[in-house]
Amino acid sequence: MTVTNARHQPMLSGAFVPVADELDVDGLRVSGTLPEALQGTFIRNGPNPMFEPRGRYHMFDGDGMLHAITIRDGHASYRNRWIRTAALEAERRAGRALYGGVGEMHFPSREEVGDAGSLKNPANTHIVRHAGHDLALWEGGLPTEVTPDLETVGPYDFGGRLDGALTAHPKIDPRTGELLAFAYLPFPPYLRYYQVDAGGALVRSVDVPLETAVVMHDFAITEHHVVFVESPMVFDLAAALAGESMFRWDPDHGTRVGVLPRDGDEATWYEADDTYLNHFWNAWEEGQSIVFAGSRQVGSAFTAGKGGAMDDASADAEPGRPTRFVVDRAAGKVRVDQFDEMGGDYTRINDAYCGVRSRYLYMGGFSGEATIVGHFDTVVKYDDASGERTTWGVGAGCITGEACFAPDPDGVAEDDGWLLAHVTDRGAGTTDMVVLDAREVAAGPIARIHLPWRLPFGFHVNWFPA
Ligand SMILES: [Fe+2]
């Protein structure tokens, strides 16, 4: 794609400039030593528009592209593929962009796109593996199944049991093998909870009525409950259609934490200090209380559309701050404690601890000036037991994205394993995949895999052991 109007498209310039090709490269150069036990594939999903947008572009709208780095016996290879959604295939047939989205709404006609639908599902946010299916996720539509080789299979609706949106942040309970998920909707009941059993069958769908549509990007699970945060970030489709931001911070709306028994039908809601949680770290039960943590934003977390912050992508918003919440169910109160000043997001844990108490929390942090969420300068680890924070700064002129935890298969302790992330040198225009020892984050990478090109801005990553 040639961007002819980049000056007016901040989310297509600098680190956002998309790549134009699909590559297969073996024998990547490796500096340092890859751990013998680190065998598998590190995959990142993210927006990479194939065609010049027909209107104002927002990163939420870009066609999903998967970037996979496979490590086998100390050798590394790279592959990237666009996710061939029905909407992208319609655009490929037309040879140009047909849709507009969060950046500037445009719904193509049925004549233009056939059965692809009037709303583009770019499948660009995350990738998870459950019950033998690799699912590329976008919270406004169905999952898109892909193969481990990154070929697109097609929309995935759990055998017809899912009729629309699914969060990009489902949770897999490592003890039961279940996948728990939800969807926020622009129409009543506004929120729906889904239970998928370990075999991949969607077995339960529960309406969780809200009074209005709010943005809900993530949630959390415990052994017996799921936790929602209904924030003042309201979702306004009518505003989007009028060319305004579809996300709006409404302080009159208030914030409620919802606790729904995993097998129940009715949530209990607790008033809380105003909070938008883009991402949760984890949640767990302590007696009658439920504890959870995440990166808390107050005020406008992000906007889009003509009235939004699109004109200066670098000044997006105040970053979230690491915060712990205690839902005292006996007292009916929520305690909110920010535990660090550092801004950051893309909060992760060792996923084997999903739903039970986790001691170690990882995040992408901003040590300097905040930039757009997803462009961090620091890899951060918190020890929730000691309160200690350890960091590794990725270097002057460099940015990093999400770091995920890859467990050492022979490990015992919660942090026995590695943190995997991408680091892009903006000046040199190169990207490395870095491997940090999760026990020694401050020591920096023990290995770097040099990619064949600069990886553009992206969203979430996951590690799939061989
Ligand atoms: Fe996310």
Image (cartoon, helix red, strand yellow):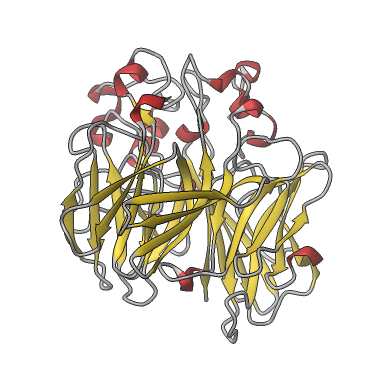
Q: Position of residue 408 (x, y in %)?
A: 60, 79
> Can the viewer see residue 30?
no
Q: Position of residue 40 (x, y in %)?
A: 56, 72
Q: Position of residue 242 (x, y in %)?
A: 35, 12
Q: Position of residue 258 (x, y in %)?
A: 30, 49
Q: Is residue 350 above or below residue 301?
A: below
Q: Is residue 290 above or below residue 317?
A: below
**Residue at the spot x=45%, y=64% of the render?**
148
Residue 355 is left or right of residue 463, and the answer is left
Q: Residue furthest front?
A: 331
Name the foreground residue: 344 vs 85. 344
Residue 321 is left or right of residue 123, and the answer is right
Q: Is residue 76 above or below residue 375?
A: below
Task: State which quadrant residue 413 falls in.
Answer: bottom right
Task: State which quadrant residue 286 falls in.
Answer: bottom left
**Residue at the spot x=68%, y=82% of the render?**
36
Is the N terminus in the top left, top right, bottom left or bottom right quadrant? top right
Name the foreground residue: 427 vs 437. 437
Count of numbered tags:
0
Name the foreground residue: 418 vs 69. 418
> Can the viewer see residue 208?
yes
Q: Is residue 439 above or below residue 186?
A: below
**Residue at the spot x=72%, y=67% of the render?**
436
